[in-house]
Every structure is written in structure tokens, then in C-alpha cells.
Image (spheres, helix red, strand yellow):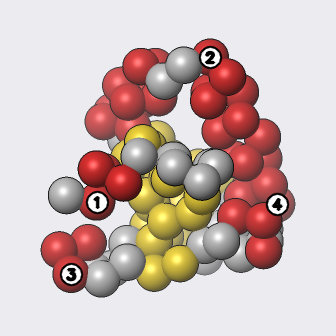
């Protein structure tokens, strides 16, 4: 799976603590191999984010994305649950 990073995602990612950036890199490697790996807890979003998906970086942080094609995902946001607002 190839990944496309939105400018908003890149800005949020740079603001994360180093330990969270390192954990996010590991989760993105898993995501790249299998977006629906059970470790990620990938799930569809509803409401204003209908059409988007999210997966867990840890118990507090999530990555919001959508599928651009069968083999490409665009990452939109990374952060705690406030990213859903």
C-alpha cells in the first residue's frame, strides 16, 4: 500500500512528541503491509467524517485516512480524539 500524506497530517505529525512519532512510524509500517491488521483496530468513521477511516497508534492517538484507490491511502490527520471534531 502506498501512502499519500496531506499537508495537515504532516504539520500534526511534526508536532508530536518523538516517542509518539516513532510509534506512529511502526504502526504505519504495519498499515502499509495490511491496513486491516488487528493490531491497528481499523474502523470506519461516521457523522461528519463519514467516508473516512481511522486506526489506532496507541490508546489515545489515531490516524484518519481514506482510500484513494485499491493500493493507495491518503492520511489526513493524526492526534488524540479531538481530530474527530
Which residue has dot 2 on it? 18
State the residue at coordinates (30%, 82%): 46
Residue 68 visible from this viewpoint: no
The numbered mark, 2 or 4, whose residue comes first in the sequence reads: 2
The numbered mark, 2 or 1, whose residue comes first in the sequence reads: 2
Disc 2 to disc 1, C-alpha distance: 23 Å
The numbered mark, 3 or 2, whose residue comes first in the sequence reads: 2
The numbered mark, 4 or 3, whose residue comes first in the sequence reads: 4
* Front tag of 4 and 3: 3
Disc 4 to disc 3, C-alpha distance: 28 Å
Which residue has dot 4 on it? 33
Q: Are marks 2 and 1 in contact (CB under 8 Å)?
A: no
Disc 4 to disc 1, C-alpha distance: 25 Å
* Front tag of 4 and 1: 1
With 57 as the anchor, is 17 left or right in this view?
A: left
The secondary structure type at the circle numbered 2 is: helix
Q: Residues within 10 Å of mark 4 (few under 14, many from 20)?
A: few
Image quadrant assignment for residue 17: top right
Residue projecting furthest to the front: 59
All told, the count of numbered labels is 4
Residue 84 disc label = 1
Q: Are marks 4 and 3 in contact (CB under 8 Å)?
A: no
Disc 3 to disc 1, C-alpha distance: 10 Å
- Between 35 and 59, the residue placed more toward the observer is 59
Q: Position of residue 8 (x, y in %)?
A: 30, 36
- Between 81 and 1, the residue placed more toward the observer is 81
Q: Residues within 10 Å of mark 1 (few under 14, many from 20)?
A: some
Q: Is residue 20 above or below residue 59?
A: above
Amino acid at each position: 500500500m502506498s501512502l499519500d500524506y496531506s499537508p495537515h497530517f504532516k504539520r500534526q505529525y511534526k508536532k508530536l512528541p518523538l516517542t509518539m512519532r516513532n510509534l506512529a512510524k511502526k504502526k504505519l509500517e504495519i498499515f502499509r503491509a495490511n491496513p486491516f491488521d488487528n493490531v491497528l483496530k481499523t474502523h470506519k468513521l461516521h457523522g461528519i467524517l463519514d467516508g473516512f477511516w481511522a486506526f489506532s497508534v496507541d490508546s489515545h492517538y489515531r490516524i484518519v485516512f481514506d482510500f484513494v484507490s485499491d493500493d493507495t491511502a491518503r492520511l489526513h490527520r493524526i492526534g488524540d480524539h479531538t481530530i474527530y471534531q
